[in-house]
């Protein structure tokens, strides 16, 4: 909510009274810098100063709920490289005043921070931002205000509230109470947050008891009013709209943007939606100043790349020095230096896989894909429920008629023990088969006759009929290599009632055959090995990771085991209703 203009006047006056820290003889840092907001609340910052002989005054800041000292190393790096850097605790966290209301408060607070910094002599009227996840999201909020002092943003792994966090495709994450515990109170809760054994044990108990999602915060030991507020809004509505830029805001954005996205990040959909909306609404001149880097990283890797994600090894070229890239970007946007050499074109993407492992470039995200190659789902006698007796992914349209495939899902059936309760589940490549056995459909492609490169976002269009008014669905895509090992290529999920839109809930008419479009897969760029096969898995969502749908068609967050209904999900594949996976084939690169 936009706060009144009267407190703003008071904050401006207060800003003049807050002494700007003086430069010391050598580079250093100063704790306890107070940044006034328009309602009188003061945020706490640690200010890292560059050497006094720095010729151009400019500053970079990060606004974080994770207590600002966690970015001490970043402050030292950027101050040693010529920038005043501030790590700032958000309202209500760390040593900042006020009450923490996650996500919603930042739209006004980040504007006040930029405006205040723009008046400080050590910033010289030139301000930029750094950070990922929460601190990537609030950069987009800053950009919507068109502030003169804000000379660019570098959002990494930015979630879009109501789109992929705290719900993904309208399905709430069970991660939410854990995250709210991490950010409860004023101080760091890292050890509690990092106790994976505790969280897993509690989730195992919660799943076994078939308890409703709306009580999960209390069940996990931390009743939270924010959690309760979120649960009231399962769809994209006005509540979530106020958390992000509107189309008119994207149309007005005209500043340099460097978006950083991880191909193995669960928050890829939101980050790419920010990019898509800017490309859709901004002017051509503004779009030309927006660069996108799609790296082989998980969520944390969008700031510090790692050589291995789960059981997936990353080539040396993928370990990009993101500090150096950020520094080069700030030199370019704040100090008039050359464009970073790494940004050869507006889109940089990394290709994984044997014989590839390299960065490639394109003028647009669409240009990385040469074509979408359809693989039609087919089976013999409607049997596709077993990894060793699966359906097929065929390059030719399946013949008609064909017996449809089906799986029966009992929401009270206890899945085998699954120890994963973390964002890293995207790299646990055997998860769906381990967790649900035959309560799913599995399709395999023929062995590839040659190495094949894919680049883009896969799509899946399936024709389904259900015998219940609702259920949750998930699709996983893998490369099964010649040695039998798996590499996850991506996943997407859907609540059946939101099959048309996340803004409209329409119960399923039992027996009606309708199209279901899975078009929010993560971006993937990979060289598939000769002899590898594609594997597509369709089934229910993992219960430890997502709010559980008991298929009754009621308020999902309030449902429990007493509401459970067994659902039969039937997948149709014939000439009239061709269910198909659309694989993005990489555009050939001239050599």
Image (spheres, rainbow, N blue to C red):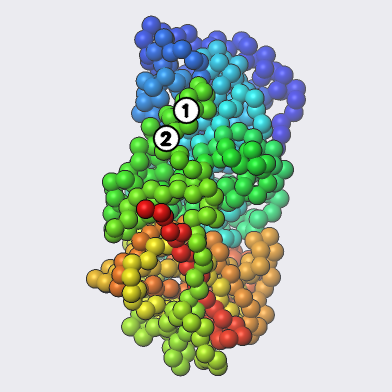
Question: Which percent across, then down, holds residue 443?
Answer: 42, 79
| In the depicted structure, whether residue 96 falls above or below residue 506 | above
Give the SS element for disc 1.
loop
**Which numbered marker is on residue 341?**
2
Question: Which percent across, then down, holds residue 580?
Answer: 52, 76
Say which of 199 and 543 sits in front. 543
Residue 255 image-quadrant placement: top right
Q: Residue furthest front?
A: 591
Say which of 357 and 111 sits in front. 357
Which residue is located at x 71 percent, y 31 percent? Answer: 3
| In the depicted structure, whether residue 411 falls above or below residue 348 | below
Give the SS element for disc 2.
loop
Disc 1 packing (10 Å; few <14; some 14–19; many ≥20): few
Question: Which percent across, then down, holds residue 426?
Answer: 40, 59
Question: With 130 as the anchor, is 436 left or right in this view?
Answer: left
Q: Residue furthest left?
A: 483
Which residue is located at x 52 percent, y 90 percent? Answer: 399
Disc 2 packing (10 Å; few <14; some 14–19; many ≥20): few
**Residue that mark 1 sits on:** 338
Residue 72 appearing in the image: no
| In the depicted structure, whether residue 20 falls above or below residue 351 | above
Residue 387 image-quadrant placement: bottom left
Say which of 1 and 476 sits in front. 476
Say which of 222 and 477 sits in front. 477
Which residue is located at x 59 percent, y 50 percent? Answer: 276
Label total for image: 2
State if disc 2 and disc 1 touch (CB < 8 Å). yes
């Amino acid at each position: 909510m936009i706060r009144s203009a009267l407190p703003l006047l008071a904050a401006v006056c207060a800003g003049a009274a807050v002494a700007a820290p003086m430069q010391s003889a050598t580079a250093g840092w100063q704790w306890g810098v107070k940044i006034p907001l328009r309602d009188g609340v003061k945020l706490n910052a640690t200010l890292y100063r560059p050497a006094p002989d720095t010729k151009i005054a400019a500053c970079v800041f990060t606004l974080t709920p994770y207590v600002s000292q966690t970015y001490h190393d970043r402050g030292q790096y950027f101050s040693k490289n010529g920038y005043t850097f501030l790590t700032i605790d958000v309202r209500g966290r760390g040593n900042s005043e006020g009450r923490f209301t996650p996500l919603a408060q930042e739209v006004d607070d980040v504007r006040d921070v930029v405006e205040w910094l723009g008046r400080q002599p050590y910033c010289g009227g030139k301000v930029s931002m750094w950070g990922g996840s929460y601190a990537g999201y609030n950069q987009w909020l800053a950009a919507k205000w068109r502030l003169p002092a804000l000379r660019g943003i570098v959002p990494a792994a930015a979630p879009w509230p109501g789109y992929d966090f705290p719900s993904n495709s309208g399905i709430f994450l069970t991660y939410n109470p854990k995250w709210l515990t991490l950010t409860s109170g004023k101080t760091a809760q890292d050890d509690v947050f990092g106790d994976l054994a505790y969280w897993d044990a509690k989730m195992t108990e919660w799943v076994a008891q078939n308890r409703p999602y709306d009580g999960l915060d209390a069940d996990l030991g931390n009743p939270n009013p924010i959690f309760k507020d979120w649960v009231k809004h399962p769809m994209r509505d006005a509540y979530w709209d106020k958390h992000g830029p509107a189309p008119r805001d994207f149309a007005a954005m005209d500043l340099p943007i460097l978006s950083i996205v991880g191909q193995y990040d669960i928050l890829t959909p939101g980050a790419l939606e920010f990019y898509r909306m800017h490309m859709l609404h901004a002017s051509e001149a503004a779009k030309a100043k927006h660069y996108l880097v799609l790296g082989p990283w998980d969520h944390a890797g969008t700031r510090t790349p790692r050589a291995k994600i789960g059981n997936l090894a990353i080539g040396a070229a993928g370990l990009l020095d993101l500090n150096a890239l950020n520094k080069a970007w700030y030199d370019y946007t704040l100090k008039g230096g050359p464009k970073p050499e790494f940004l050869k074109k507006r889109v940089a993407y990394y290709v994984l896989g044997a014989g590839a492992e390299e960065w490639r470039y394109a003028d647009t995200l669409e240009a990385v894909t040469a074509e979408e190659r359809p693989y039609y789902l087919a089976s013999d006698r409607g049997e596709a429920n077993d990894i060793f007796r699966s359906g097929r992914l065929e390059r030719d349209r399946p013949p008609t008629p064909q017996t449809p495939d089906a799986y029966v899902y009992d929401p009270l059936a206890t899945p085998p023990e699954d120890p994963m309760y973390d964002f890293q589940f995207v790299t646990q490549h055997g998860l769906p088969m381990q967790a649900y056995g035959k309560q799913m459909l599995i399709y395999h492609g023929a062995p590839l006759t040659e190495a094949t490169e894919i680049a883009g976002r896969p799509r899946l269009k399936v024709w389904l009929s259900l015998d219940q008014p609702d259920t949750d669905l998930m699709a996983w895509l893998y490369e099964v290599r010649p040695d039998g090992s798996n590499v996850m290529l991506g996943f997407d999920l859907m609540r059946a009632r939101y099959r048309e839109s996340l803004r409209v809930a329409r119960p399923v008419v039992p027996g009606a055959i309708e199209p279901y479009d899975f078009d929010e897969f993560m971006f993937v760029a990979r060289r598939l090995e000769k002899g590898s096969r594609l594997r597509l898995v369709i089934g229910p969502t993992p219960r430890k990771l997502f709010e559980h749908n008991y298929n009754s068609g009621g308020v999902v967050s309030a449902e429990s085991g007493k509401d459970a209904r067994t659902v039969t999900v039937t997948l149709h594949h014939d000439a009239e209703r061709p269910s198909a996976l659309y694989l993005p084939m990489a555009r050939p690169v001239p050599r």
